[in-house]
Image (cartoon, rainbow, N blue to C red):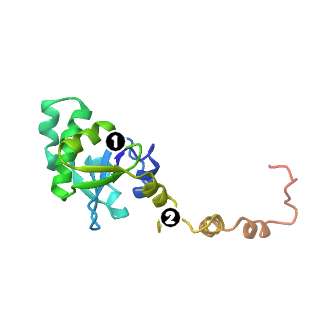
Amino acid sequence: MFGPTDRDADLFHVIPEVIVDGFPYLEDGRGRRAAVLWTADAVHVPEHGVEVLPREAYGWDDLVTASRDEFEIWSRLVPRVCADLGIREAAVPPQFPVFLADALRAAGVRLRVDPGLFAGRRRVKAPREPSSRRGSCTASATGSGSTSTSARTWPASVTSSSPAT
């Protein structure tokens, strides 16, 4: 996958942090999950079981020196990451960028668009997600003190129709 988490539901499901710059997220098929990120964006990513691969480890600085075109830079960097992780075949979501698909195919990576795979993943709750709306309401009430409990401790003269003073 590739994109920013604030505009890509598939990426946000995997890394529920707001990252506004596009980045690649990869899985090697053997349980390794990784994202190539700028260090400032990577702070909380490991908390979600995703390994952070620094862009600099794949020649980011040299690529930026050679070209200021972000698409060209990612087109050259992502195939290097796939080679490093041993990825020779990958399922991608329908919104996967064409510029990266072209670069990966040119590097010998076989891609297949699989919308069902990604939609199915989003339908399965991650451990961090509440099991129900009632569960999240209960957690909210527990964390802040239940409103109904607080209301019972107010003086009887205070009602919802009493003016605020």
> In the rendered picture of this protein, how many numbered marks are placed on residues?
2
Q: Which mark is residue 124?
A: 2
Residue 155 shown left or right of residue 59 in the figure: right
- The image quadrant of residue 63 is top left
Most extreme residue toward the top, as rendered?
Answer: 68
Question: Residue 139, image x and y in percent?
Answer: 60, 68
Of residues 113 and 16, the one nearer the viewer is 113
Could you tell me which residue is drawn at 15 percent across and 47 percent down?
58
Label 2: which secondary element: loop
Of residues 10 and 139, the one nearer the viewer is 10
How many residues crowd around disc 2 within 10 Å: few (fewer than 14), some, or many (20 or more)? few
Question: Residue 130, image x and y in percent?
Answer: 56, 66
Question: Residue 132, image x and y in percent?
Answer: 61, 67
Of residues 100 and 2, the one nearer the viewer is 100
Question: Residue 48, image x and y in percent?
Answer: 37, 62
Of residues 142 and 58, the one nearer the viewer is 58
Q: Which mark is residue 39?
A: none
Could you tell me which residue is drawn at 41 percent across and 45 percent down?
94
The answer to whether residue 93 is above or below residue 157 is above
Mark 2: which amino acid? Val
Could you tell me which residue is drawn at 40 percent across and 49 percent down?
93
Kindly report the distance in space between the C-alpha atoms of the residues bearing marks 1 and 2: 24 Å
Q: Which residue is mark 1?
A: 22
Label 1: which secondary element: loop
- The image quadrant of residue 102 is top left
Residue 129 shown left or right of residue 1 in the figure: right
In front: label 1 or label 2: 2
Mark 1: which amino acid? Gly
Residue 38 shown left or right of residue 10 in the figure: left
Could you tell me which residue is drawn at 45 percent across and 44 percent down?
6
Q: Earlier in the sequence, mark 1 or mark 2?
A: 1
